[in-house]
Image (cartoon, rainbow, N blue to C red):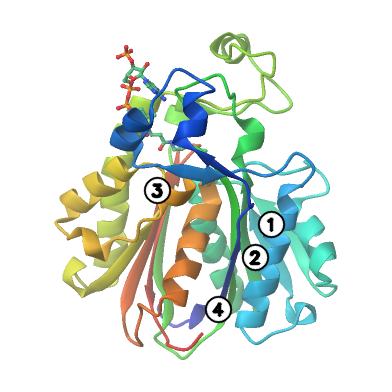
Amino acid sequence: MAFNKISAGLTGFGSSLPEKILTNQDLEKMVDTSNEWIIRRTGISQRRILEDSTPAFKLGARAAKDAISDAGLEPGDIELIIVTTETPDYLTPSMACLIQNEIGAKNAAAFDLNAACSGFVYGITVAGQFISTGYYKNILVVGCEGLSRVTDWKDRNTCVLFGDGAGAAVVNAVEEGYGIISTQLGADGAIGHNITIPCCYASEEDNKARECDNKSVIWMNGSEVLKFAVRVMAQATKDVIKQAGITIDDIKIIVPHQANVRIINGAAKRLKISDDRVYINVDRYGNMSSACIPIALDELMKKNILKKDDYFVLVGFGGGLTWASALLKWQGGS
Ligand code: ACO
């Protein structure tokens, strides 16, 4: 979908991570795995894990406050909060309502959006529509996840992959021709059974696939997801760039979902771009689902890598299965 006339952009960034670090060496003591296997197959060295007593929304609130202040706004200026999550603390109240209360954003409507790891790009696309029509002026999008809460710590196929964290961005009007240029959202429910986290219902197959008593943990067909991910990350990037009439050579940097360094490198190879044009932090945090892209963005902004007029792409894939990409032109500032 092209954002031809609008000027909705990301103008403030924030992120928050739990203090507790779980290293590959720690995992070696928990399951039959090795630091060497995890690094070779995933690129992950460590991940952050929430303390049992801390709800994930607290991370989201900290990231949100930083993003609002980075945008030069106050919580009362925010008119809508969209929280992207597949690991809400409660089904109700939503994470968005919990964060609204925590940060004192009294004037904001609030809802959660679940598109798994693609959530943040779905979220800014929805926010961009509200900005482009003039319905709202200031929107907060928060990717907030506590994947450790749905991890089976005895399943070596999955427990080495995930971490907790939150990232946020403010979406509002920017100079015409800048900000979100185009986005592409996709879903294929027919292959959704490859990643499942049962919640209020679990089928017989779901229960059989999980060896632990808790049937609400994540299960994944890793190799199927890996093949899908490499293909869709490259294609979604190509599509969103083509839609805007530019080429891959015009892109300063790609900020991909951080699931596995092999997926990122595989997609980069298909796109024929060098590694230094792809942002990677999966080694430090693992897969934090919809929080990955906004956390990476916050890091990118703090490093001042983007200059005014630079194009950059956000691209993700995940449960559903879903995928999403966005092309942005940096308006400068922040
Ligand atoms: N340590 C040691 N060995 C392991 C481990 C481990 N942690 N995990 C699996 N193995 C073994 C397997 O049992 C298998 O052994 P076998 O050959 O004797 O059967 C062997 O390693 C190879 O297993 P594969 O699953 O084929 O390994 P693969 O190279 O596919 O890597 C991985 C597995 C890392 C899970 C990969 O498939 C992957 O990253 N997939 C994508 C996952 C993803 O991106 N999910 C995103 C969405 S998640 C969400 O929405 C929250």
Percent x, y for residue 13? 56, 73
Q: Is residue 85 visible?
A: no
Q: Position of residue 107 (x, y in %)?
A: 82, 75
Q: Which residue is mark 2?
A: 63
**Marks 1/2: CA–CA distance:** 6 Å
Q: Residue at x 34, y 42 (%)?
A: 43
Q: Are marks 1 and 2 in contact (CB under 8 Å)?
A: yes
Report the residue at 24% width, 48% height from top. Answer: 265
Amino acid type assigned to the residue bearing label 1 in the image: Leu
Q: Please name which of the two marks, 4 or 3, marks the residue nearer to the observer.
A: 3
Q: Is residue 235 left or right of residue 169?
A: left
User: What type is the residue that disc 2 sits on?
Assistant: Ala
The disc, 4 or 3, on the residue closer to the chain's N-terminal end is: 4
Near-viewer residue (297 or 124) = 297
Is 143 located above or below residue 50 in the figure?
A: below
Q: CA distance from mark 3 to mark 1?
A: 20 Å
For label 4, being within 8 Å of ligand 1 is answered no
Q: Earlier in the sequence, mark 1 or mark 4?
A: 1
Q: Amino acid at mark 3?
A: Asp
Q: Mark 2 to mark 3: distance in Å? A: 21 Å
Secondary structure of the residue carrying numbered label 3: helix
> The disc labelled 4 sits on which kind of residue?
Ser
Query: Considering only order in the chain, which callout, 1 or 3, is on the residue closer to the N terminus?
Result: 1
